[in-house]
Image (cartoon, grey):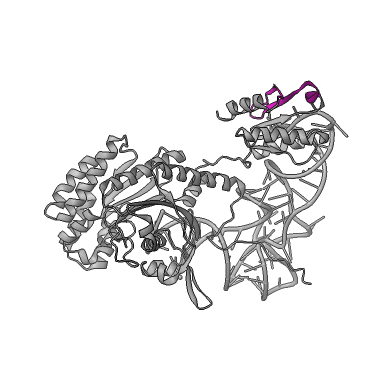
Amino acid sequence: MSNQLIQPRTLSGFRDFLPEMMIPREKLMETARRVYRSYGFVPIDTPTLELSEILCGKGSEETDRQMYRFQHGKRDVAMRFDLTVPLARFVAQHHNELGMPFKRYHIGNVWRGERPQAGRFREFAQCDFDTIGTNSIASDIETVLVINDLIRAIGFEQFKIRLNNRKVLNGILEKANLAEHSVAVLRALDKLPKIGPEKVRLEMLETTGAPDSAIDQILMLSQISGTNREIIQQLGSLCAGNELAEQGREQLADVIDATEALGLTENNLEIDVSIARGLDYYTGTIVETFLTDLPSFGSICSGGRYDNLAQLYTKQQLPGIGASLGLDRLLAAMQQLDLLPKTKTTAEVMIVQFDKSKLKEYLKLAADLRSQGIAVELYPESKKLNQQFKYADRRGARAVIIAGTDEFAAGVVQVKWLADGTQTELPLTENSTEIAEWLISRCTK
RNA sequence: GUGGGUAUAGCUCAAUUGGUUAGAGCGCUGGAUUGUGAUUCCAGAGGCUGGGGGUUCAAGUCCCCUUACUCACCCCA
């Protein structure tokens, strides 16, 4: 027998989640679910593994390179790179059963074999929501509203949703006779806030070989500034004469009008004509979302409109729009901003096991409180009180219930509130209702 | 995938120009305290200095490889 131990470790870009990280992580998922459901999105799931021909067909060379892919027996399989391509396969396969329009959300892990960095992992969860089967601008507006609700429900007020429209970009590219270079031009344009107009210009000249005058036309976009309405106005002359661009500009105006009427301000929603996003399938509205306090983390929620989601798998034309919350990136950002609670417990209340002979009474009290909606933990051993208290405190419980010989004789319990150390005596009645009420009134604060 | 930086206890960091047995704070376990956490005092556990190889009388320290993290690209949640 070898006594050589295997060093416990995880693959680069893959992580363990300890309880204090997993508790807020699950809470984020619950928040996302709640917000999505409030708009009528319904949950689906798809396999993490698919045939490579399903996942690789659509992507660029870059996504193919990042895909985890292997042979299993005779099959060539791959791990999903995002949740959108599986959705395309899913709706192509099931659209008769689903009916259109179809609004789904999907929370799941995806895998990308790229170099990890802060907020960038090789395995991470995405929380997608999409509306399939409609071109209505109402869906574009709702997509922005969902993102706004979602980020606020998570607890942020300092964030910026950046809005743009690919029709504006593509229309202006057409006007400048640069349509054939759209990928290179948009890729360079996307870097505008990061590297500035001069470097963007150089990159465009280098990659396209287009004349200065054409590049200048594109770079007019970098001159645009002001309020959302001013930007729309300034876009007027840039878009003039190109149907696609004008259509895009109108859609931008529609989204701004509607969301403004519902109370979204420029603090949280801003047109940014330089953003281009995922260069493969977006065709209309595009959005990305940044935390004001951590802009370098990149977008935590991005998406956009596409004309034909499932064209690889069906002849049905399926337009749609959706976005994806980068749950693990957001979690990493919150950790860096020290916004995560330190709690290591899921029970707000702990009962100490004071008197071993009263185990049944403790179990009954715990069951009573649970049935009234309180998460309760009974300390598993009848150890010294100070150790039991220490456990409750270290894990982040809010209250401890103590019942010893004296209390049982008097028909009461002591409830200690750990934050301030105060102790309250409450009657131990048939269903522990008074104790439950007291705890509920304190714990919800 | 390309290029730079870093790696010492669970965490944050020490350790003369290479020189005895690698230290501290926090955290963890127990005790002081058999009816009370967070404060105080005491004790203990925890390190093949990320892993492997090399130079040297001698390596945490110098060299090479590797792995992980990190930053910039690429791309993107």
| Residue A187 to residue A356: above or below | below
Query: Residue A428, position in %: x, y?
Result: 72, 25
Q: Is residue A419 magenta?
A: yes
Query: Residue A322, position in %: x, y?
Result: 35, 52
Query: Residue A6, position in %: x, y?
Result: 69, 66
Report the number of numbered marks.
0
Q: Given the current orientation, which residue lies at the most extreme left position?
A: A241
Q: Is residue A309 left or right of residue A73?
A: left
- Quadrant of the drawing holding the N terminus of chain A: bottom right
Foreground residue among A128 and A236: A128
Q: Is residue A362 left or right of residue A339?
A: right
In the image, what residue occupies the spot 40% across and 49% down? A301
Q: Which residues are magenta?
A: A406-429
Foreground residue among A234 and A395: A395
| Residue A282 to residue A70: above or below | above
Q: Is residue A87 left or right of residue A263?
A: right
Q: Is residue A346 left or right of residue A147?
A: right
Residue B18 occupies which quadrant of the picture? bottom right
Q: Given the current orientation, which residue lies at the most extreme front position?
A: A97
Foreground residue among A331 and A318: A318
- Quadrant of the drawing holding the C terminus of chain A: top right
Residue A192 visible in the snapshot: yes
Q: Is residue A57 magenta?
A: no
| Residue A10 to residue A269: above or below | below
In the image, what residue occupies the spot 46% across and 45% down? A33
Query: Residue A92, position in %: x, y?
Result: 36, 63
Residue A305 visible in the snapshot: no
Residue A444 occupies which quadrant of the picture? top right
In the image, what residue occupies the spot 53% across and 77% down? A73
| Residue A326 to residue A345: above or below | below
Residue A198 occupies which quadrant of the picture? bottom left
